[in-house]
Amino acid sequence: MAAEIKGVVEEPVATEGMGLSAPPEQSAEDSPSPGWHLAKEPWRPETARDIEWLFSKREEARQRIAEVQASLDAAAAKAQAYIAALNERAAEATAAPNATLHWAEATIAEWARANREAIVHGKVKSRKFLGGTVGFREAPERLEIPDKGPELKSLVAWLEVQDPSLGLARVKLEPAKDAIQAHFRTTGEIPPGCEHRAAGE
């Protein structure tokens, strides 16, 4: 079975006489160069006190990681608030132009539909103006397919009883991990992309 590490040591413990490569109380003057713990022959714990010291170092690392993450989260929150403020100002600044744009396009389309015979003739389906082009095209017959609400539920219920070979619905293909593990234990087959891990503690 894999070893399980629990608990932390809240107070650093003395390490004198423990044979540590870099005792916690060592002065900056006597401290080894950075990367001492990556030496070819790294220090290994020998006593319970060594393990307690390692737990304390683990807790220090966790606290530092938490501090960095908290700083990152705070900076991200400020950035998001700034972006939200910019988007709000942009929406306010473009509200009037957007209204004008929609009004102009709707008015042009309405006028063009009412005066089609005067705008285009025969097979011609568009006419250029100085500021743009008015064109006509016939939209093919189609369905408005719902993507939410009770209409979507009704559609899904209908799809569930249709022949899958028709391809009317898309199904997201995802690995069933438990079933794959069972298949491996039964057959010994290792599917592509899977990494075999030997049994052990």
Image (tube, rainbow, N blue to C red):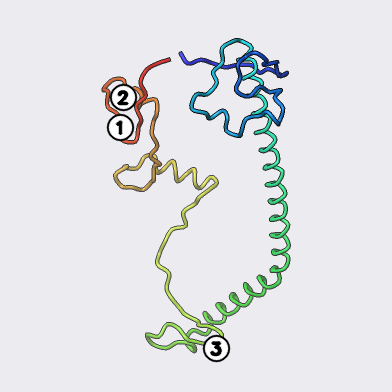
Q: Quadrant of residue 198?
A: top left
Of mark 3 and mark 1, the one earlier in the sequence is 3
- Residue 127 at what x, y percent from top left? 47, 86
Amino acid, disc 1: Pro
- Observer-side mark, 3 or 1, equals 1
The first of marks 2 and 3 along the sequence is 3
Between 31 and 45, the residue placed more toward the observer is 31
Residue 84's disc is none
Q: Where residue 178 sits in the image (x, y, percent)?
A: 39, 25
Q: What residue appears at the point 40 percent right and 37 percent down from the top-left corner?
A: 174
Label 3 SS: loop
Pointer 2 residue = 183
Q: Amino acid at mark 2?
A: His
What is the three-letter code of the residue carrying label 3? Leu
Neighbours of disc 1 within 10 Å: few (<14), some (14-19), many (20+) = few
Residue 24 versus residue 108 in the image, above or below: above
Judging by the rendered image, the residue that carries numbered circle 1 is 191
Residue 194, compared with residue 82, is above or below; it is above
Q: Quadrant of the C terminus?
A: top left
Q: Secondary structure at mark 1?
A: loop
**Crowding at mark 2 (Cα within 10 Å: few <14, some 14-19, many 20+):** some
Q: Identify the residue under disc 3.
A: 130
Left or right: where does residue 134 sit relative to residue 48?
left
Q: Is residue 35 above or below residue 112?
A: above
- Could you tell which of marks 2 and 1 lies nearer the N-terminus? 2
